[in-house]
C-alpha cells in the first residue's frame, strides 16, 4: 500500500543569542490526543474532540481511522469522528512504522470487532519499546494471539474481565487496556497503571462514553458497557510543549508567559527549573511566567521516572540547558534505554558530556557554538533547537520531521517570541 502523506525533510536555521520575550499559547497535548482519537473506534456515535494539535502524528491517526472506514471531519484544531461505518480491523505496517502510537488502535478494535490485526511495531530510535504488557491484558481477557508475517493477530469470543498487575508502568499499555476493558460489562482491576495526565484525560473520555472507571493510586477498577456512546471533549494542554518553552524562556535569559497550561501537571519540571535558578510566577491554574534575572544556571541532578516524577520527555531539553550550567550536572534516564542520542549532537555544538550507563554527566561550558546537527527523535530535536537559541552563530537542525510529529508550529511560536529562526527545505 502506498502512503498518501509525503514527508519533506526540512531544516531549521537558528541564529542564536536572542532573548525570548512575550506570550505564547500552548497547544493541546499530542499524547492525550492520540489515544482519545483511537477511543472513537469504540462507539458508533459521533465524537467531537477539541484543541487537537495540528501535528503529523495526528494526521497519521486520522489517516488510520479513515483507512478503517471512519468518517473524519478535520477542522482547525478540532476533529469530528464518526466510526459507525468502520469495517476493517487491520492497522497496516506502513502506518504503524510511521507512528508507533498506532498500536493504540489494538484495544478498541479488539473490543469492538473481537478481532484486530496490527502490524508489529519495531524498536525505535529511543529503545526497544516492547508491547508485551498490552498483549498480556488481552490474553487475560481471553484473546488468542499469534504473530504472522510481521502482524499481530488477536481474536476473542467474549471479553472476560481481567485482573492484572502491570510488570512495568506503561502509558500506552495502560491506555490500550483501559479502552479495551471499557467494553467489558464485568468488573476488571488493573494494578500498577500509569497515571500520567494523558492517561487521566483518556479516562475522562471513557467515562463520558459510559464506562465506570475508578482510580485509586495506581489501581483502576473498570466496569464497562457493551455499547459505548459518543462524547465531546477538549484535550488537556501539552505539558511537554509547556516544559520546553519554560526551559527556552529561562535558557535565553528571557521573560515569557505561557497561556493554556495546566500548572498542576508541571510540578517536577517547575521544581527543577527553580532549582536551576529560574524565576517562575504562576497566575491561577492556567498561566505561568518564567524569567531570568540574568543570573547563571545552577547545575542539576535529574532522574527520570513515571509521573509524577520527572518526565523522560523533558530530559533532552534540560540537558541542553545544563550544558551552560555553572558546574557538573547529571541526568539519569530510567524509562528508555537509548534516549541519549542528542548527546553526540550537543557535543558538536561544544557541549562537554559523557555517558556512563544510564547516566549522562554534563560539565557546563561558557558557551555553545552553532553547528549543523541532526534530529534523531522528537525530544532530542527539541533540545537541539534550544541549544541553537543560545549558541553563538548559526545552527542548522536537519531532518526536523520528528519535531513536526510532536510540536505544533514550534518555529513560528519561537519567532513570535523574538527568536531568529526559519524553516528551509533541507540542503536548500
Ligand atoms: N515497556 C515494556 N513492555 C510494554 C510496554 C512498555 O517493557 O508492554 C517498557 C518500554 O520499553 C519502556 C517503558 O516500559 O522502557 C515505558 O514505556 P511506555 O509504554 O510507558 O511508553 P509509550 O507508552 O510507548 C508514551 C509516550 C512517550 C513517552 C512515554 C513515557 C505516547 C504516544 N507516547 O510512550 O512519548 O515518552 O510514554 O512517558 O503517549 C514523546 O512524546 O516524545 C514520547 C516518546
Image (cartoon, grey):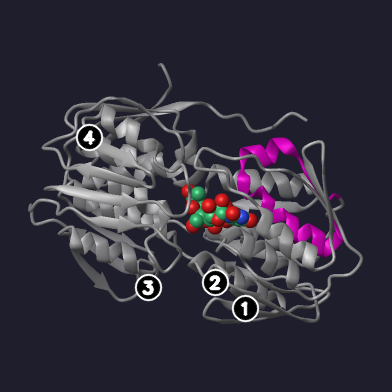
Few, some or many C-alpha atoms within 10 Å of disc 2 (few <14, some 14-19, many ≥20)?
Answer: some
Residue of label 1? 220
Residue 97 is a magenta residue: yes
Precedes in sequence: disc 2 or disc 3: 2
Q: Does 258 sit left or right of 85 as displayed?
A: left
In the rendered image, the quadrant that contains the C terminus is top left
4 and 1 marks in contact (CB < 8 Å): no
Q: Is mark 2 within 8 Å of ligand 1?
A: no
* Numbered label attached to residue 264: 3
Residue at (62%, 65%) from the top-left corner? 174
Range of residues picked out in magenta: 88-115
2 and 1 marks in contact (CB < 8 Å): no
| Residue 64 versus residue 154 in the image, above or below | above
Precedes in sequence: disc 4 or disc 3: 3
Ligand 1 positioned in quadrant: bottom right
Q: Is residue 78 visible?
A: no
Foreground residue among 110 and 359? 359
Few, some or many C-alpha atoms within 10 Å of disc 3 (few <14, some 14-19, many ≥20)?
Answer: few
| Residue 41 versus residue 182 in the image, above or below | above
Residue 96 is a magenta residue: yes
Precedes in sequence: disc 4 or disc 1: 1
Amino acid at each position: 500500500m502506498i502512503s498518501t502523506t509525503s514527508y519533506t525533510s526540512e531544516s531549521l536555521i537558528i541564529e542564536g543569542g536572542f532573548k525570548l520575550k512575550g506570550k505564547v499559547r500552548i497547544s493541546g497535548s499530542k499524547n492525550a490526543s492520540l489515544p482519545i482519537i483511537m477511543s472513537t473506534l469504540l462507539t458508533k456515535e459521533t465524537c467531537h474532540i477539541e484543541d487537537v494539535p495540528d501535528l503529523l502524528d495526528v494526521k497519521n491517526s486520522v489517516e488510520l481511522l479513515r483507512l478503517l472506514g471512519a468518517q473524519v471531519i478535520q477542522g482547525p484544531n478540532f476533529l469530528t469522528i464518526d466510526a459507525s461505518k468502520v469495517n476493517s480491523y487491520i492497522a497496516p505496517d506502513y502506518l504503524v512504522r510511521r507512528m508507533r502510537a498506532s498500536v493504540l488502535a489494538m484495544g478498541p478494535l479488539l473490543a469492538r470487532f473481537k478481532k484486530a490485526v496490527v502490524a508489529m511495531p519495531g524498536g525505535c530510535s529511543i529503545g526497544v519499546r516492547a508491547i508485551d504488557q498490552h498483549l498480556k491484558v488481552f490474553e487475560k481477557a481471553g484473546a488468542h494471539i499469534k504473530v504472522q508475517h510481521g502482524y499481530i493477530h488477536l481474536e476473542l469470543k467474549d471479553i472476560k474481565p481481567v485482573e492484572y498487575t502491570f510488570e512495568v508502568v506503561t502509558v500506552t499499555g495502560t491506555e490500550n487496556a483501559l479502552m479495551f476493558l471499557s467494553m467489558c460489562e464485568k468488573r476488571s482491576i488493573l494494578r500498577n497503571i500509569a497515571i500520567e495526565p494523558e492517561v487521566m484525560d483518556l479516562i475522562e473520555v471513557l467515562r463520558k462514553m459510559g464506562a465506570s472507571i475508578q482510580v485509586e493510586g495506581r489501581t483502576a477498577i473498570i466496569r464497562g458497557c457493551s455499547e459505548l456512546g459518543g462524547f465531546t471533549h477538549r484535550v488537556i494542554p501539552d505539558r511537554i510543549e509547556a516544559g520546553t518553552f519554560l526551559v527556552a524562556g529561562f535558557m535565553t535569559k528571557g521573560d515569557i508567559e505561557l497561556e493554556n497550561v495546566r500548572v498542576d501537571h508541571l510540578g517536577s519540571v517547575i521544581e527543577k527549573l527553580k532549582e536551576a535558578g529560574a524565576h517562575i510566577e504562576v497566575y491561577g491554574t492556567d498561566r505561568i511566567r518564567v524569567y531570568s534575572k540574568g543570573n547563571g544556571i545552577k547545575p542539576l541532578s535529574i532522574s527520570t521516572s513515571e509521573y509524577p516524577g520527572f518526565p523522560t520527555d523533558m530530559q533532552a531539553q534540560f540537558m541542553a540547558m545544563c550544558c551552560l550550567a555553572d558546574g557538573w550536572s547529571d541526568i539519569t534516564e530510567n524509562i528508555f534505554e537509548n534516549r541519549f542520542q542528542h548527546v553526540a549532537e550537543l557535543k558538536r555544538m561544544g557541549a562537554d558530556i559523557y555517558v556512563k550507563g544510564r547516566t549522562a554527566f554534563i560539565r557546563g561550558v561558557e558557551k555553545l557554538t552553532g553547528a549543523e546537527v541532526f534530529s534523531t527523535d522528537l525530544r532530542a530535536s527539541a533540545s537541539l533547537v534550544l541549544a541553537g537559541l543560545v549558541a553563538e552563530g548559526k545552527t542548522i537542525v536537519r531532518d526536523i520531521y520528528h519535531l513536526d510529529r510532536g510540536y505544533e508550529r514550534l518555529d513560528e511560536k519561537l519567532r513570535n517570541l523574538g527568536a531568529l529562526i526559519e524553516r528551509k527545505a533541507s540542503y536548500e
